[in-house]
Image (cartoon, helix red, strand yellow):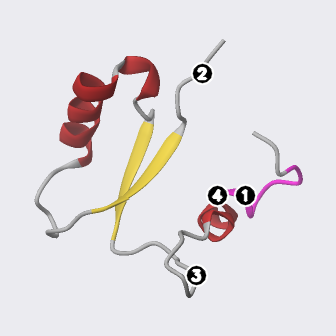
Amino acid sequence: MYTSTEHAEVVLKEAGAVKSNELQKHVGNELGGYKTPKTLDIVAELPVSVVGKVLRRKVWEKYWTDTNRKVG
């Protein structure tokens, strides 16, 4: 059984060009409802390594600071 994505962080090319609920609708239309994130944050930038890969652990850390378990 496949579950939907819980949360996504997005960096826009043009600041303020789209609202998060509009983006969620677009993703739902293009990819389908089961792949659409339940929540979405638009951020200025994502942490990246020196080779340009997104440091997902750094992104996750801010959501796991108040919990004892690091499991979804």
Q: In this view, does 39 lie to the left or right of 5?
A: left
Q: Which of marks 1 and 2 is in front?
A: 2
Q: What residue type is labelled 1?
A: Trp
**x, y percent for residue 40:** 39, 46
**Is 64 a magenta residue?**
yes
Secondary structure found at label 3: loop
Secondary structure found at label 1: helix
The outermost residue toward the left is 17
Question: In the depicted view, which residue is nearer to us: 59 or 62?
Answer: 59
Residue that mark 3 sits on: 49
Residue that mark 1 sits on: 64
Q: What residue type is labelled 3?
A: Ser
Q: Nearer the viewer, mark 1 or mark 3?
A: 3
Is 70 rendered above or below residue 7?
below
Magenta span: 63-69
Q: Are marks 3 and 2 in contact (CB under 8 Å)?
A: no
Question: Mark number for residue 3?
Answer: 2
Question: In the depicted view, which residue is nearer to us: 61 or 52?
Answer: 52
Q: What residue type is labelled 4?
A: Tyr
Q: Which amino acid does label 2 sit on?
A: Thr
* Earlier-in-chain disc, 3 versus 2: 2
Dot 2 crowding, Cα within 10 Å, few <14, some 14–19, many 20+: few
Q: Which of marks 3 and 2 is in front?
A: 3
The outermost residue toward the bottom is 50
